[in-house]
Image (cartoon, rainbow, N blue to C red):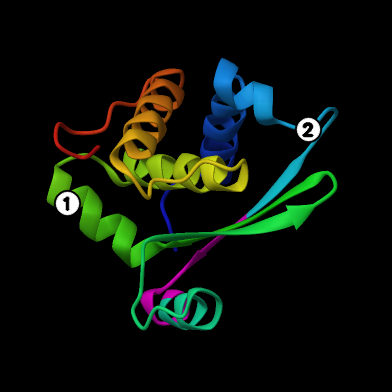
Amino acid sequence: MAPVPVRSIRSVLLRAAAVPEVAARMPAGESTVALRLTGDAEMEQLNRTFADVPNATDVLSFAGWGAHLGDIAISWPATVRQAARYHHDARTELSLLAVHGLLHLLGWDHAVARERREMNRITVEALRRSRLTPAPGRL
């Protein structure tokens, strides 16, 4: 499976939650997020079932309830492909996708350029707090 320790991604998400804009949207008290690493076939099925999109994607977010913010599904094969494409390591790509999923759970979207710029800015800041830098052109 993925050669990225669970504690690494947990730390990235905790640091992301401390970015002021993110912290402002976090519910009071402790929260949970479930993260599932899976393959392209399952991501295609999830995307088809829940978004009516007939192809695989790299990350999907599913809203939760109460203290459970929701679930994030990430394709490990897509993570590896994208890390190679952008010339950074798989940990950076996986972290970027996890933060992206968290932002969706908290209400951010990227349907228009302004929203995309805001999500990218917050993602870069969240990764910076974990000493990770996405490759130029990734965001």
Mark 2 sits on what residue? 27
Reading the chain from its start, which is encountered first: label 2 or label 1? 2
Which residue type does callout 2 highlight?
A: Pro
Q: Give the range drawn in magenta.
A: 35-43
Which residue is pictured at 46% across the width and 75% down the height? Answer: 47
Mark 1 sits on what residue? 84
Q: Residue 12 at x, y = what percent?
A: 52, 31
Which residue type does callout 1 highlight?
A: Ala
Dot 2 lies on which element?
A: loop
The answer to if 39 sits in the magenta stretch is yes
Q: In which quarter of the image is residue 89?
A: top left
The answer to if 96 sits in the magenta stretch is no
Most foreground residue, 98 or 53: 53
Q: Which of marks 2 and 1 is in front?
A: 2
* 38 to the left or right of 10: left
Q: Residue 102 at x, y = what percent?
A: 56, 43
Q: Residue 52 at x, y = what percent?
A: 46, 80
Q: Residue 101 carries which label?
A: none
Dot 1 lies on which element?
A: helix
Most foreground residue, 130 or 115: 115
